[in-house]
Image (cartoon, coloured by chain):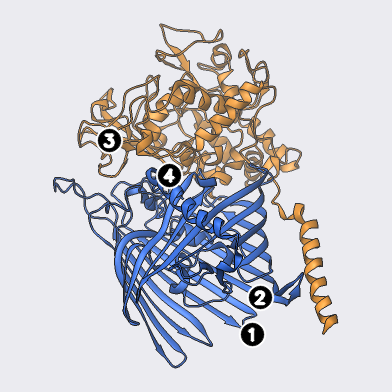
Amino acid sequence: MKIKQIYKVLTVVIFSVITLEACQKLFPAAPAPDNTLAVGVIPGLTPAQLQEHALGDDEFSQIFTQQQGLGPVFNNISCNNCHVGNGKGSPATALTRFGRATGRTFDSLVSENGPDLLPNAVPGYTGDVLPPDANVQVQLIAPTIMGLGFIAALADSTILANAYPHDGVAGVPNYVNPTSFFIPQAFNIPFNGQYIGRFGRKATRVSLQDQVVFALANDLGGVTCDYNMVKPYNYLVGPYTGNYVQDPDVSAGFVNHLVMYLLTNKVPPRRDSANSDVLAGAQLFTNIGCVTCHIPTMVTSTLPGFPSLSNQTIHPFSDFLLHDMGSELDGGVPEGSAQSFQWRTAPLWGVGLSPNSQGGGLFLLHDGRATSFIQAIQFHNGEASARKAAFNALTSQQQQQIVAFLNSL
Amino acid sequence: MKIFIFNYKKIVAVFFSACFAIYCHAQKDSSLFKRIEIDTSKQKLNMDGVYNKPFLTMGKMPVAMGGYMEANTQYSVTQGISADGFAFQFQRVSMFLESSIAKNIKFNSEIEYENGGEDIEVEYAFMDMEFNPLFNFRGGIVLNPIGSFNENHDGPRWDFIDRPISSTTIIPSTLSNAGFGFYGKYYYDNWIFAYETYLTNGFDDGIVSNADGQTSLADGNQNPDKFDKSNSGLPMFTGKIAIRQRKYGEFGISYLTDVYNEWKTDDGLIIAPKLSASVFALDYSTSLLNDRLSITTEAAKVWVQLPPNTVNTYGSQQDGAFIDIVGTVIKHKMFGWNNAKWEVGVRLEYANYNIGSFSETGGPIYDYIWAIVPAIAFRPVGSTVLRFNYVYSEQSDEAGGNFILGNTPVKTGTMEFGISTYF
């Protein structure tokens, strides 16, 4: 009996020791750095910038409620709800942009709570419905937020260097009116008081600050800030806001933290870049002319205060210009000088990790209609028709090599 | 727990200080005390949880006092990062007051201090009036009898430091409200039949307007006015039926339903359709092998009518469950304690906050958490426990974020050591 008890005590002690010894192994490890979209922060930031990045990170995941100024109508309740894990969104969280097209004129129906449909509402209110006079609408899934700092650091001259007819394509910059709070960098070149937009699927935002302010009010919904006190509401239901929160709902500092977060996110490293299929695919990608628009390499300009964003060689695989993509991708909704059939060349860095943020599937193009790279290529018409034809002329094995290359980005 | 009686904090503190001052003075003669000792690790009827506690009585005073405390250390790592590092946590201290007012009339209460006294909440404070064992009246602040954990939430009863996920987020334990109702028991041979039924105040719009970004009965239970009025102006119904067989254990079925939204103004103007929240729960507990093995389990399903135009991260259905299996491996005199016990156990738990699929894509919504919790506990006496837990969990919907699309779940490992004791 006594021996039996000793065994029991020993069992407990041994189990405890093993448990303690195994502690480190029991704690889940970080995902491999080359297999995640959230790869962290760019190097070379000051302590204050790091602090602002961390604050912006928290704010990016913050759930907004009515008490914090959300609504009364809104699209979603958190930035992270659409830009899941910093990556591409899914059709399940897509945004609807609408308007009325009449011949060559377009009305984004701001007087009827355009341009974005805000279908959700705080309790007691009714979400947006499509106004009866809206005759066009386009679904937009959230783009990835990786590498935005490098795009912000591109000089206008670098973007313009690839513009206008060459090699069978004719990319054009989207000149847009700057917001009242836009502070141009030395590399921003005005043209008739307008500046080159570079953010958004139609390159309608000049700066990240501009993008964040617009997104708070429209893509999220109803969140006012020091830069924008206009609160969208559903004019079809009633002209009153639905909360008792004094505007602005968030401060300029809140916006600036978000901007810092977006500016300073790293780009995920490539994977399998030495694989023979990937190398062959990269060569084919160049040979058939995809790189005319999906430009592999650019050099950033000087962005004061950000040495690791400045004068860097980057590989975004984009020219950040608008291209005619043909009638199949014509969403019917123009933005600024960007026509409804024109889309900014989507940067491809990180595109191979898209399934990590899209629930394991793949939803490509502006509305997520393509569920594979090959399908996405088949939707490339207009200026890209010749490249698509060249892709279709490849053997199946060569096409798969291009897919392997895209997956490595 | 949030602050529900914030304005009464000082009054409550003074009241309890005064009560304890009597005892402090009395400690000059310890023979004045009489401890009503029980082994709280043993199961009785779940509905008896509010009385199945050790109390201290003094002389012929008609008031018995008691309470418990919980504290623990914690080190948690999520995906290779320990956000909070090593932490000591003082979860709570609760104090009980029980009094026999007259024959068949009793008063019972528990007041809980959390976060070092910053949050104070009356967990329950009710009067029981017995007319017949099968028919008793209870009124005041009552514990809603949904599931089994809500009425048996005292820390020292459990070998697990954290409360079950499903019992705190699917069923928002501790769930108590002001109201009235009836309960009773009927004994037959080795069988006990019991029931409880109450009408109380209920939830509020926090169920679907909250900072968690998901449907949450727990958030709907934070209304500071809940002891004063019903948000909807309608009572919440809670009912439970339980059957216990001495050999096979206790099985309970419970149901709760409430209109939670403010559907009309104070002037009677109807401004919205009534929206309901309902919970159906099953629970089972038993002791086997001469009380050396205990099994406790609870499962709950929630239905919530959502307002129109609610973002798709809010689910209209939720479910969750846990099962605790605890075995006594050593029961022996140790370090002077005659019935000291070493116990090992494991908890398996799960909660899904958004059952369904996306209308946009038809794809399933992922919003779940599951965890496995091995535990070792030492009980020098039945009312005191030292416990060591490891918690491994996977969550598809990261807190504050949204992984409902089915992306790789977030993995967390947590080491905990804690103590909990009645006093």
Q: Is residue A322 above or below residue B165?
A: above
Q: Amino acid at mark 2?
A: Gly
C-alpha distance separating marks 2 and 1? 9 Å
Disc 4 and disc 3 on one polypeptide chain: no
Residue B364 appears in view: no
C-alpha distance separating marks 2 and 4? 43 Å
C-alpha distance separating marks 4 and 1? 49 Å
Question: Residue beneath label 3, please?
Answer: A242
Counting residues from the N terminus, which is met first, the one under dot 2 or under dot 4? 4
Task: Give the camera-side residue of A363 and B231.
Answer: B231
Q: Amino acid at mark 3?
A: Gly
Left or right of B53 on screen, residue A96: left
Counting residues from the N terminus, which is met first, the one under dot 2 or under dot 1? 1
Element marked by disc 3 = loop
Q: Quadrant of the C terminus of chain A?
A: top right
Question: Which mark lies nearer to you, 4 or 1?
Answer: 4
Do residues under tags 2 and 1 come within 8 Å of each other at their CB atoms?
yes
Q: Residues within 10 Å of mark 1 (few under 14, many from 20)?
A: few
